[in-house]
Amino acid sequence: MRAYRKNKRQRRPFKDRVVSNIYILPNLLTTGNLFFGFMSIIHSIRGNFVFAAYALVFAALFDLLDGRVARMTRTTSRFGSEYDSLCDLISFGMAPALLSYLWALHPFGRIGWVFSFFFVACGALRLARFNVQTSVGKGSFFQGLPIPMAAGIIASAVLCFQKLGWEAEGTYGILAIVGLLSFVMVSNFPYRSFKDIDFRGGLPFHYLVAGVLIISVIAYRPEVMLFILFLSYAVLGAVFGVLKAGKNRLSKQQEN
């Protein structure tokens, strides 16, 4: 009885647990991310797959802006972090999964929607792991492929196929891409975040040359080249991750 009363006294009042004040600007930007993710879902259901892909691009832009604005204005908060993850699950989990299914995977029947669900589930796990591992993503590498990049690859695939006039329905390549993206999101493979590069400071001349080259390549055929660059980023991360895992396993066997 005494223990119960003691625990009861230690509980915080309800009014202290309620979020009273939130930062408006970064959370409005996060809502913009959610809005375009929802718009992508609507356009996917209507069969406007190109518009759905562009909506994902705008969602990614708002997702990039909200974090930058919050850090620049020193308005980061736990509420904003949790709200951002919930919006990301809809915009970069549910929306691209539905887009990939209705655009290309529905001819596969049950296998198609299972792969789409696997993408959503792995995206949710990726976000949950990121939230509890506060140090992950703040350094030079991400642990696993970030979910906005996975969604961006699906969106760029839609734009690439539309630009080239390729048929996507029942394409095993799209099925493989969705499966690969799902796997690498929840993997421990390190993906370079490029946060360690200080673009405001002095850098060697070859960085500028590389930047000009990348811009020129993308400008040639943006829809196609962005898809190739994004997919290469995901595939190379998986390849290097597998090679590193195999090397570490081999060294452990040699030590034993």
Image (spheres, grey):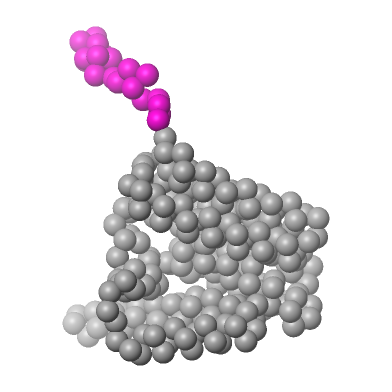
| 163 to 53, vertically: above or below | below
Q: In which quarter of the image is residue 59?
A: bottom right
Is 10 left or right of 242, judged from the image as shown? left
| 111 to 236, vertically: above or below | above
Relative to the observer, which residue lies in front, 108 or 89?
A: 89
**Residue 99's x, y, as percent?**
70, 61
Relative to the observer, which residue lies in front, 93 or 58?
A: 58
Magenta span covers which residues?
1-21
Residue 30 in view of the camera = yes
| 230 to 80, vertically: above or below | below
Residue at left offset 56%, top offset 51% = 33
**Residue 28's x, y, as percent?**
52, 43
> Is residue 53 magenta-colored?
no
Residue at left offset 74%, top offset 58% = 44
Quarter of the image where the C terminus is located: bottom left
**Residue 150's x, y, as percent?**
54, 66
Residue 141 in view of the camera = no
Majority secondary structure of the magenta segment?
Answer: helix
Is 26 left or right of 166, judged from the image as shown? left
Quarter of the image where the N terminus is located: top left
Q: How many marks?
A: 0
Is 72 left or right of 169, judged from the image as shown? left
**Residue 182's x, y, as percent?**
54, 65
Q: Quadrant of residue 165?
A: bottom right
Residue at left offset 54%, top offset 87% = 216
